[in-house]
Image (tube, rainbow, N blue to C red):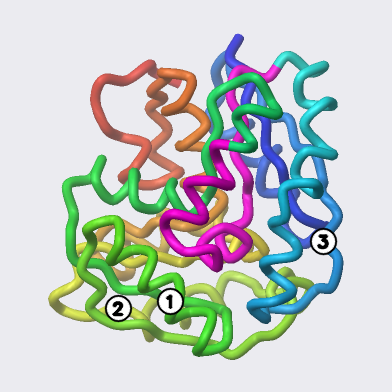
Amino acid sequence: MTALGILYPGHSAEDEYPRIEQLLGSDIRVDVVHTDIGEDAHRVDALREMGAGERLAAGVAELRLAGADAVVWACTSGSFVYGWEGARQQVRELALAAGMPASSTSFAFVHAARELGVRRVAVGATYPDDVASLFADFLRAGGLEVTGVRSSGIVTAAEVGTWGEEDVLTLARAADAPDAEAVLLPDTALHTAAHVSLLEKALSKPVLTANQVTVWEGLRLADRRVNAPSLGTLFTREPIIQA
């Protein structure tokens, strides 16, 4: 049994994780511990407060007791707002507090793009423009080329959590560009786990979404590979363990 520890802020799309666990269909457990979101606002100061070390550390003991093999901070905006080096320090502190390998969703996007061998990516963000641009900066710091950023201007995770399939598909199509090798949808408040196959079919290219890459990153830290095509191209890479 491989146990993944997920630190998830608040309650917007946490039901993605049991869904993904079911789709993996093998000896993998995904344990979700909720952190205090503070003010629900896609605003830099609020996001930096949400990702503060003491907030993350509060959930770590529960994950240790659950027997997690690795932990991922499942908040893209609450990590990239610190910049590349700040996000690295955030992960270092989390690993130290947890006593296990650690990462965050922001790094998961960069690692997943590298896994797929793509360099040029388009971003479809639910965030306001200023926050979305910080994610693009983070991706560039990770060696990716951002072909364009589509922002939706949504201020709260609660609103993002109400989006359905058509909303997600509209965002992905609006973000896509002919020269983009993949499309990235960075908000962990966005429900996407049930839609990845549809998105990839509609765009004819890989689509990376926040909760999808978060679980993949946990598996990477635990040195596991799982073949689960319903979760997109990212989950069809070799070497595989057939689900």
> Mark 2 near mark 1, Cβ–Cβ under 8 Å?
yes
Identify which amino acid the numbered label 3 is placed on.
Ile
Q: Which mark is residue 37?
A: 3
Residue with the mark numbered 2: 176
Q: Which mark is residue 97?
A: none
Against 141, residue 176 (above or below) is below
Alpha carbon of mark 3 to alpha carbon of mark 2: how far?
A: 30 Å
Where does residue 55 sit, x and y in percent of width and height? 80, 49
Q: Which residues are magenta?
A: 68-92
**Label 2 SS:** loop
Query: Which quadrant of the view contains residue 182?
Result: bottom left
Alpha carbon of mark 2 to alpha carbon of mark 1: how far?
A: 8 Å
* 63 vs 240, nearest the viewer: 63
Query: Which quadrant of the view contains residue 206?
Result: bottom left
Identify which amino acid the numbered label 1 is placed on.
Gly
| Image quarter (top left, top right, bottom left or bottom right) of the C terminus | top left
Q: Is residue 202 left or right of residue 53?
A: left
Where does residue 79 sit, x and y in percent of width and height? 57, 58
Residue occupying the point 72% across, 69% down: 161
Residue occupying the point 63% across, 27% down: 96
Q: Residues within 10 Å of mark 1 (few under 14, many from 20)?
A: many
* 218 vs 170, nearest the viewer: 218
Does label 3 or label 1 sit earlier along the sequence?
A: 3
Alpha carbon of mark 3 to alpha carbon of mark 1: how far?
A: 23 Å
Against 123, residue 60 (above or below) is above
* 9 vs 150, nearest the viewer: 9
**Label 3 SS:** loop
Q: Which mark is residue 124?
A: 1
Against 30, residue 173 (above or below) is below
